[in-house]
Image (cartoon, grey):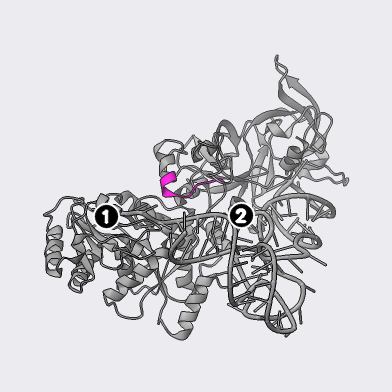
Amino acid sequence: MDLTDSPATLDFIREIVASDRKSGKHATVVTRFPPEPNGYLHIGHAKSICLNFGIAAQFGGRCHLRYDDTNPTKEEQEYIESIERDVRWLGFDWGTHLYFASDYFERMYVWGEKLIEKGRAYVCDCSAEEVRQRRGTLTEPGRACEHRDRPAAQSLDLFRRMRAGEFPDGARTLRARIDMGSGNINMRDPVIYRILHAPHPHAGAAWCIYPMYDYAHPLEDAIEGITHSICTLEFEDHRPFYDWVIDECELPEPHPRQIEFARLNLTYTVMSKRKLLQLVQEGVVSGWDDPRMPTISGLRRRGFTPEAIRDFADRIGVAKRDSVVDVQLLEHCLREDLNRRAPRKFAVLRPLKLVIENYPEGQVEEFEVSNNPEDPAAGTRSVPFSRVLWIEHDDFRETPPPKYFRLSPGNEVRLRSAYLVRCTGVVKDAAGHVVEVRAAYDPATRGGATPDGRKVKATMHWLSADHAVPAEVRLYDRLLTKPDAGDVEEGQDWKSNINPDSLEVLDNCWVEASLAGAASEERFQFERLGYFCVDPDSAAGKLVFNRTVTLRDAWAKIEQKQG
RNA sequence: UGGGGCGUCGGCAAAUGGAGAAGCCACGGGACUUUGGAUCCCGCAUGUGCAGGUUCGAGUCCUGCCGCCCCAGCCA
């Protein structure tokens, strides 16, 4: 998939952009992805990133990466670095267009003075509590305070002294003078500057007053020549103020246009930064990059590909209605991509010994196994076969249920690319558990062929016990037990839906020796099991794999129906 | 109850008043198969929140209802 690929029909935002191009309103399309560096990016941000960078690519424009760093009390350098890494990993390039809102602070300040001079802003001495009380409610209008009518010269003096650091945090604010009676609460003289004696991760100690998002954002967009400022639905109410700022600061035409779309929600997970932070801080997960997290770094560690995420973003579309996307669509996009590209390997997660009774002790044969049946160009590898093998515990049943085609006493199956074998018996321990399965192979079926046309219903993977390499495998499942985090019993909160079995660690697994040198984040298909990738915890002599996603499993469904 | 939005299949989502309301995921069948994978085929909205109206013709236009989401941070 190419980065400029786009859905067949235009979503409502692309329609606006296309129409603006056609009318000549803008010479070139300029969008922006404006994260606040106060957390890690997640799959919801990926939707926005794909939208903004995708539109820029599709219409021959550009997309800026801009940190909306107007609140130093919540922002950190660590987040700035993770954001750049994640956007780049997703496959997008902002070229030289990396910006910080904080680099515009001086200009924003000058516009603030201008607004005061025009009578469009005033310094307010009210406390936060007083501001709240005068703001009114959803149904009652707000009430002006006495500072609203103070002379511009006085506001100007106070604003300069705010900047100079003469007042403590919260002592005063600069507010826009608009309409305390507006039905839109955002227009009831919103605060545009607050005093915050806090060092800034990018601007350092230069400022002790910081602009609010609602004031800063339109200015940032206008400064950079953004044509289409795409944000999420909750900012719809803020648009009148966005336009007000640009008008009152007398920014040149054409003005950027704010367009809102519905944020992404996914089943069986949470997307809010607050909840994600909670998971990290309370140790429910191991960190922002825990493979169960819907963060970009978590998905990367889980084994997702950027291609799959981009494909997903294309498929979910862009609209204004609140929606919840089925996580199975994401998994589908992943499987489709990985099926095409992931090299196949044999791995046995829950080992059961299989002894081929009629196979000579000490003999070893090498079998050629396809690296990827979907891609002949991937070639083959050779896998050693011997008398004692590991098979999957789940691939043997002493008393097979209906439609169970795998190994069971008397039944014949194919060992993939090796031989057909028939189960001749079992060995049990004192407690009666099957500890070993016995079988006989048919030398005429070398390579797994059946020259006599005989059919077997199951083909299984296997590993030569003497040649396999040990590994730890981490099995991940959904973070939540319910599709909707908010679906809880009376008095419970969303955390009651956290899946206690979202991680299972298997530490006596066996994998092909060819996996010994696999690099961190390298992805494979373990045949018949799923897609796996090498975890960064992996070290020489101690392989660790994460299960990215299982293969689709028809048998699991049959079994489930059988109860 | 003020303001701003949104209602099309189980979940996403097309449709720009004109043919049988796309497509994808999920789900259910079948074919094929040396991965119970992949692939292929079939099925899946007599109906667009509800009720009226306009029109030769309405998911699209009008009126009225109903439901859901967002807003009362010196967060973004």
Q: Is residue A275 above or below residue B9?
A: above
Is residue A355 rendered magenta in the image?
A: no
Q: Is residue A62 left or right of residue B57?
A: left
Magenta part of the protein: which range?
A268-275
Q: Residue A142 location in percent, x, y?
A: 31, 60
Q: Evaluate whether residue A99 shows in this view.
A: no
Mark 2: amino acid: Leu
The residue depicted at 30 percent of the width and 80 percent of the height is A252
Q: Nearer the viewer, mark 1 or mark 2?
A: 1
Q: Is residue A312 left or right of residue A556?
A: left
Is residue A273 rendered magenta in the image?
A: yes
Q: Which residue is disc 2 drawn over? A: A329
Callout 2 secondary element: helix
> For the residues marked 1 and 2, what is the alpha-carbon distance in whole angstroms?
46 Å
Q: Is residue A411 above or below residue A123?
A: above
Q: Evaluate whether residue A44 shows in this view.
A: yes
Q: Which residue is disc 1 drawn over? A: A131
The residue depicted at 57 percent of the width and 61 percent of the height is A316
